[in-house]
Amino acid sequence: MNLGWLHPPTGTKASPQEILLPVRGWYIALTLLTALVIDLLALPALVQQVRPDFIALTLVYWVVYHPRRVGFLPAWVLGLTMDVADGSLFGQHALAYAVLMYLAILFHRRIVMFGMRQQVLHVLAILLASQVIMLGVRLMAGAEFPGPLYFLSSLFGAALWPVLFNVIRIPLRPRADPDAA
Amino acid sequence: MEYSPPPFFKRGPSLLTRFAFFSLLSVVLLISDARFSYLQVVRQVIAAVAYPLQRLSTLPEVLAERVAEFFVTQAQLRRENDQLKRQELLDATALQVQKSLDAENQHLRQLLGLRERMSREVITAEILYANRDPFTRRVVVDKGFQHGVKPGLAVVDDVGVVGQVTRVFPWISEVTLVTDKEQAVPIQLLRSGLRGVTFGVGYDGTLELRFMPVNADIQNGDLLVTSGIDGTYPPGLPVATVTNIERNAAYAFARITCTPAAGVNNFRQVLIVSGGETLPDNPMAEDDSGPRARKGKK
């Protein structure tokens, strides 16, 4: 498969690369667990419909910036947990997250090259792909199409990407050198 | 951006292999869940592990409610108190009549040699959250099989039928609302006694009464109550009111739309009605024990 056309043209303005502290395994686990709790939050039905999927967003972040640290297995297990908590079909979120992981790993070198606005578009495409997978699975299982508002969740998710990007990085930013004072 | 590193940088199976493995596994799970529902045990285990997280995530809402309760004004309480007193007075008179009617009814039943209706056990439950799955109409309540909830039990609120318990976990259970797609409730028209079955259509606030002949005696505003012949729902509970009837002679059946009676989306406490009557076995099923009969029974 020739994916040469996917490479950004040379000379594109890359996002400023920060120097961050090394990421520890427990920090990744903590962020994913927090995302799970946020996803489980009991919200009014209207908000529930358009609530972005924080697990998907967090997974995309870790895969894009640390592709060797998060594998398919944790994503898949998180998917199963979401299936049980949601009462959806068993394996629906798991499959969607597998697709999401695949796309994120496939594009991670490309995504980090771009500035924040272009990154949002990439994340939007990845989130939409995982939502389309879920929609396809449910339609095949005989559910009713929940209406176009269903896709708002991805839009909000992509819009939150810059926020998530900065929040996850807070503990990773090096503190001012204590010896300097 | 798939590339193959030199063999001395081996990093396990390739991306495509891993993706194919996990998606295949998911598809196998999907099919076994959608077609055969084999995975109840796995579901139970994961649900038990995720339970503390689920409770944790309902915490903000509970806290917000506590704070809101704390700031209830005295005027509000007075008003509510007055209202409740008035309601109690009304209820008391109704109860007195009810008691005498109950006694009379029991007496008549005994005279007629009818089975005494079993009193049903009732479990009060609180709705933890509406289900996040946008494809179904379900809610999760805070009572599970530790409290005696079983799949298939009817769930009602103070106005009418809410739905039916479909999945039971140790401490919580899932209730499918009557508005869920293809969720069926056997009903009877209060006015004419006509029996039928309502089906959910997958939208909020709409039920469909299917398989009614075009000339059936149904009017707008008719109240549908549970018929009780299924042995699941106690008889006589309001389910819905008829809101729209489309009679078209070109079709065999009329298109009848109803609005559910219970505020299927706006209530907090519900009752899980357990201990239904055990109905005698279907005599038709015993006649021929061929595969067709089995299928029909299911």
Image: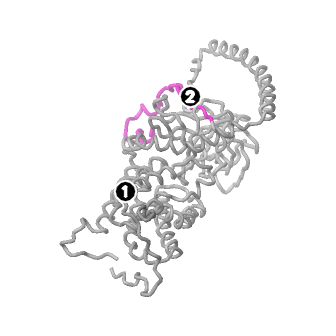
Residue type of the residue flagged with mark 2: Ile
Residue occupying image coordinates x 46% and y 76%: A16
Same subunit, labels 2 and 1: the answer reads yes
The one nearer the camera, B137 or B256, is B137
A23 within the magenta span = no
Residue occupying image coordinates x 52% and y 71%: A120
- Sort mark 1 into few (<14), some (14-19) or many (20+) by Cα contacts within 10 Å: many
- In percent of width and height, residue A150 lies at 57, 61
Magenta-colored span = B269-298
Toward the front, the furthest residue is A181
| Residue carrying label 1 | B26
The one nearer the camera, B297 or A62, is A62
| Residue carrying label 2 | B123
- In percent of width and height, residue B151 lies at 48, 36
- In percent of width and height, residue B252 lies at 63, 51
Q: Is residue A118 above or below residue B201?
A: below
Residue occupying image coordinates x 37% and y 72%: A106
- In percent of width and height, residue A155 lies at 56, 66
Element type at marker 2?
strand
The one nearer the camera, B166 or B142, is B142
Question: Position of A107 compared to A154: left or right?
Answer: left
Within the image, what quadrant is residue B81 found in?
Answer: top right
Q: Quadrant of the C terminus of chain A?
A: bottom left
Element type at marker 1?
helix
Toward the left, the furthest residue is B8
* Chain bearing mark 1: B
The one nearer the camera, B287 or B171, is B171
Q: Is residue B212 above or below residue B7?
A: above
- Sort mark 2 into few (<14), some (14-19) or many (20+) by Cα contacts within 10 Å: some
Please indicate, yes or no, whether residue A60 appears anywhere in the rendered image: no
* Chain bearing mark 2: B
